[in-house]
Amino acid sequence: MTAPPAPPTPPHPPGPPWALLAELTHACPLRCGYCSNPVELVSRSGELSTEQWSEVFRQAGALGVVHTHLSGGEPLLRRDLPDLVAAADGAGLYTQLVTSGVGLGERRLAELNGAGLRSVQLSVQHADRVTAERIAGARSFTAKERAARLIREAGLPLGVNAVLHRGNLDDLDGLIRLALDWGADRIELANTQYHGWAARNRAGLLPTPAQVERARARVARWRERLGGTLELVWVAPDLVDATAKPCMGGWGAVSLTVAPDGTVLPCPAAGTLPGLDPPNVTHRELAWIWRESRAFNAFRGESWMPEPCRGCALRTVDHGGCRCQAYALTGDATRTDPACRHAPDHPLVEALVQGAADCADPPAYVYRGGVR
Amino acid sequence: MTAASPASPAMSWRPVLARGVVLRHDRVRGTDLLLLPERVVVLDGSAGGVLRLCDGVRDVAAVVTELAVRHPAAPVAAEVPEFLNRLRKEGWLR
Ligand code: SF4
Ligand code: SF4
């Protein structure tokens, strides 16, 4: 295990951040096998208060943030959610609720709408109710159907988000039809990222290359057929594609994440990196955290990059890939993301993908317990 | 590109930002922005001023007239209807 290097001085002061991922709570009525939230969740009593979140939004707005995802866990479990929406809106932030739909009744939605909510992203696990609820580890399908209807009736833009894996990649047509039925403006087909809890279920989630190929071809066909009436976003499976993902648009380049307890991270998964010593909004101003903190400078720019990234033309596109994945697979966050076919550690990923291809009967999901 | 005639459909719709689309000035960056559910569009110099007139009451012809008064030297009649139409196709105006 290696600690990150001493923070390099960034070549120039970073530009202001655009987006804030506000993880309002880790509590969630669902128990998705692919959940990328940490294995150790923040308890309800450890969450920031209404006033503290309002201050986070105010500081974020002053720093240049214009967009916030109000996420979790399930943000609807925060009873003060309408106040938080109003605070973010008042700070000039565009607010998008990222929800499972469980707990989104008519009154709640009206309150949120009145507080200045601009759009909603609704998660969906599968188009088949039974399979969907097995993936989510909880009854949730009826609640999602109702939430989608209410969101449309309220006239809010609706995005549907499906995390893709071995258990639903073959249902791609079903997922897209569901998004059309529900009147969504957009569907995000995001292949699983193996962070947090999802890493425990990797063997059950990792798709076969053949599944990915079929799904990709279907997405292309749907794109042609729909011609823009439903926006289709495909987030590629980096391991199967042997291609590093441009994680977060670069470390400390575009957005920041605030965890339920006020910890500020350059990426939602970065809490696991050893020696990162992430700052907290209860101790430091967001502006200092963004510009000066060791955590935000650790992998900013290119000076931290090892070979082969250092000399690679793609480094400005993928920023050397995902630091959290490099750490998860090699124990060293400074190595080239093993997802990349050029990475010295890529054989590790090849073995994982080959393992998935060879496995006829993937293991059942391990579900987590609840948050207190 | 030719300017649409005042009676054409290109001139008679009453543009207004679509639901979920927000126009705002970004003081930190000194620019106007269009904010969408998953996207931020940075508007160049005059675009924000054009969109501020799109209130769902004025039709395109009225927007053009207003802009022509404000910027007598600019080719508004030639460019503005086309610009608004492009944003309508993107789904940002309705
Ligand atoms: S992935 Fe599932 S379990 Fe995890 S926070 Fe989201 S809805 Fe809850
Ligand atoms: S070597 Fe590094 S920069 Fe080049 S493609 Fe791979 S991860 Fe990206």
Image: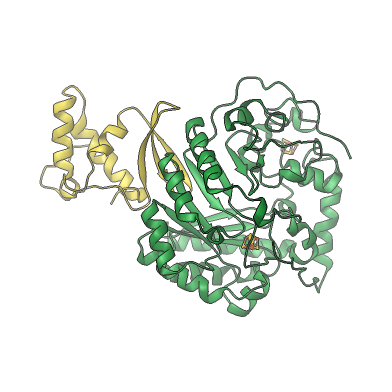
Q: Position of residue A200 (x, y in %)?
A: 79, 60
Is residue A239 rendered to the left or right of residue B34?
A: right
In the image, A238 versus A332, the foreground residue is A332
Is residue A319 rendered to the left or right of residue B26?
A: right
Q: Position of residue A34 (x, y in %)?
A: 70, 62
Q: Position of residue A194 (x, y in %)?
A: 74, 55
Q: Position of residue A28 (x, y in %)?
A: 63, 63
The image quarter containing residue A249 is: top right
Vertical position of residue A344 compared to residue B46: above or below: below
Vertical position of residue A173 compared to residue B93: above or below: below
The image quarter containing residue A214 is: bottom right
Vertical position of residue A119 compared to residue A6: above or below: below
Q: Residue at x 78, y 41 (%)?
A: A273
Q: Residue at x 62, y 73 (%)?
A: A132
Question: In which of the image's four quarters is ligand 1 placed?
Answer: bottom right
Q: Residue at x 64, y 32 (%)?
A: A316
Q: Is residue A363 visible?
A: yes
Vertical position of residue A107 compared to residue A98: above or below: below
> Which part of the image, by quadrant, shows the N terminus of chain A?
top right
Which chain is tinted yellow? B
Q: Is residue A246 visible?
A: no
In the image, B74 versus A326, the foreground residue is A326
> Which part of the image, by quadrant, shows the C terminus of chain A?
bottom right
Chain A on-screen colour: green
